[in-house]
Image (tube, rainbow, N blue to C red):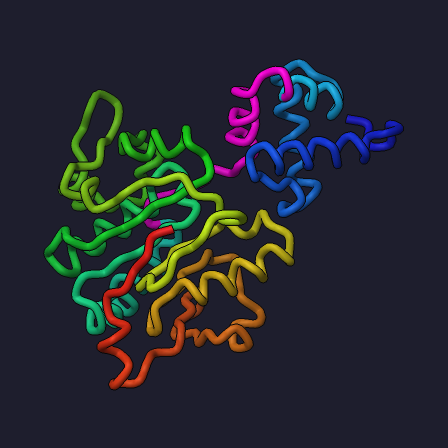
Amino acid sequence: MDREKPGMEEDFARLRHFLLSRSGFDLGAYKVEQMRRRLDAAMFRLGVRSYAELLQRLREDPIAVQDLIDRLTINVSEFFRNPEKFRQLETVILPKLLRRWTQLRAWSAGCSYGAEPYSLAILLREVTGRSDHQILATDIDQAILERARRGEYTPEEVKNVPVQRLRRYFHAQGDLYVVREEIKSMVEFRRHDLLRDPFGEGWHLILCRNVVIYFTEEAKAQLYVRFYHALAEGGVLFIGATEQILNARAIGFTSPLPFFYEKAAPSASEAGSARGRVLAP
């Protein structure tokens, strides 16, 4: 698309305002070039040639609005993505959290098609021998959430799952691997917009991995502060292996391991009153 076409920036601004007012989806919170590339691809599929034409199409077809948002959001995930970090989650972080809370409540923010929350559920099942932990998995994309609820994956999508876990926690269904009910039952999937919706408070563990890399620096900074306030004292934020919270100490985080950020633990006298309080987004 020709970026120099007269009126292009004004049309983009109108499109941004329309999507924000109609659905709460803010194009301006994402990196500009990346979002415009995705818009160009969506426009090509729709057969429109300008932001003005796209805006007219959206005004005429309300269903197309959510379809466009679903196409613009990023849905990339893997089971046990960065296995060495999940190993640290399993052997260091979870045992530490479980010494404080016997029943963990975790939030997988930007869960895509469910690989991340199901990976966490498998770890919790193995570490504790129980399935009574609660995991909330959220994403802005309603269609990808429906797929996550089904828990059906191709061989390529489960390539990082060790063979023993694959046999234990999945069953074959044709060419697919389907998550068993004991793991499915630990995860609740719900639509949630990280840039707009409330986070709740009192979370023991929040996973938000390889999601904020698509946001502007301003949006990232705001999200990390909100994650901090959403955690229980002693709770941990787990981010992606290419991410870093540069002002972590200023926010109030400590970092027990790279890519894990802990909210300062309460004193012994405070721990009892804070324990177990969770409000879902």
Asked if residue 113 lies left or right of residue 275, the reply is right
Q: Is residue 87 above or below residue 150?
A: below
Q: Is residue 249 above or below residue 151?
A: below
Residue 6 x/y as whole percent? 89, 28
Residue 240 x/y as whole percent? 46, 56
Q: Quadrant of the N terminus?
A: top right
The residue closer to the viewer here, 1 or 270, is: 270
Asked if residue 26 lies left or right of residue 52, the reply is left
The residue closer to the viewer here, 190 or 182, is: 190
Q: Is residue 130 above or below residue 192?
A: below
**Residue at (18%, 61%) from the top-left corner?**
103
Question: Quarter-wise, where is residue 207 in the image?
Answer: bottom left
The residue closer to the viewer here, 37 or 187, is: 187
**Residue at (26%, 26%) from the top-left corner?**
176
**Residue at (61%, 41%) from the top-left corner?**
26
Q: Residue furthest right?
A: 6
Q: Is residue 84 above or below residue 39?
A: below
Asked if residue 62 lies left or right of residue 137, the reply is right
The magenta segment: 59-80
Question: Quarter-wise, where is residue 68 in the image?
Answer: top right
Residue 250 x/y as whole percent? 55, 76
- Taking the magenta stretch, the answer to whether it contains residue 52 is no
Residue 58 x/y as whole percent? 63, 21
Question: Quarter-wise, where is residue 137 in the image?
Answer: top left
